Amino acid sequence: MTPGTPATACALCGGPATETIEAPRRTLARGPDPGDPSYSLTVILPDIELCLEHALQVREGTRLIGWCDDPRCRTYGEVGEASSCGNLYGKLGTSKRV
């Protein structure tokens, strides 16, 4: 994790972000042969900005970050919670620390 940009907000509470987590890459589609890695569609999501409290909870695994991929939304939030468009935030893979 690295210090967040001062003008950004925490993805979970909207407070000032102090930490940045690199989002995992998401593989959305693969070719017809799952053993053939030559074809896949991978999406790189933006970094996740969090306040110190939520960054600690994410690191400890007591809070899970999710992503809403609806074109009206495309934001982070807590897994299982409703996003602003009404869809639930889906679970992300393991993320790396920046």
Image (spheres, rainbow, N blue to C red):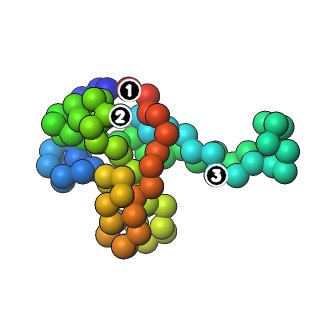
User: Where residue 90 appears, x then y in whole percent?
Assistant: 45, 55
User: Which is more foreground, mark 2 or mark 3?
Assistant: 3
Q: Are marks 1 and 2 in contact (CB under 8 Å)?
A: yes
Residue at image position (63%, 45%) is 27
Cα gap from disc 1 to disc 2, whole angstroms: 5 Å
Q: Amino acid at mark 2?
A: Ile
Query: Which label number is shown at residue 21?
Result: 2
Query: In the picture shown, does residue 36 fall above or below 78?
Result: above
Helix, strand or loop at label 3? It is strand
In this figure, which residue is indicated by the disc labeled 1? 97
Query: Which label number is shown at residue 28?
Result: 3
Query: In the picture shown, does residue 93 fall above or below 69?
Result: above
Number of other residues with Cα within 10 Å of mark 1, as a class: few under 14, some 14 to 19, many 20 or more: some
User: Where residue 62 appears, x then y in whole percent?
Assistant: 27, 37
Q: Quadrant of the N terminus?
A: top left
Residue at image position (17%, 34%) is 52
Query: In the picture shown, does residue 21 fall above or below 15?
Result: above
Residue at image position (34%, 43%) is 64
First-in-chain label (2 vs 3): 2
User: Where residue 69 appears, x then y in whole percent?
Assistant: 48, 61
Number of other residues with Cα within 10 Å of mark 3, as a class: few under 14, some 14 to 19, many 20 or more: few
Helix, strand or loop at label 1? It is strand
First-in-chain label (1 vs 3): 3
Q: Amino acid at mark 1?
A: Arg
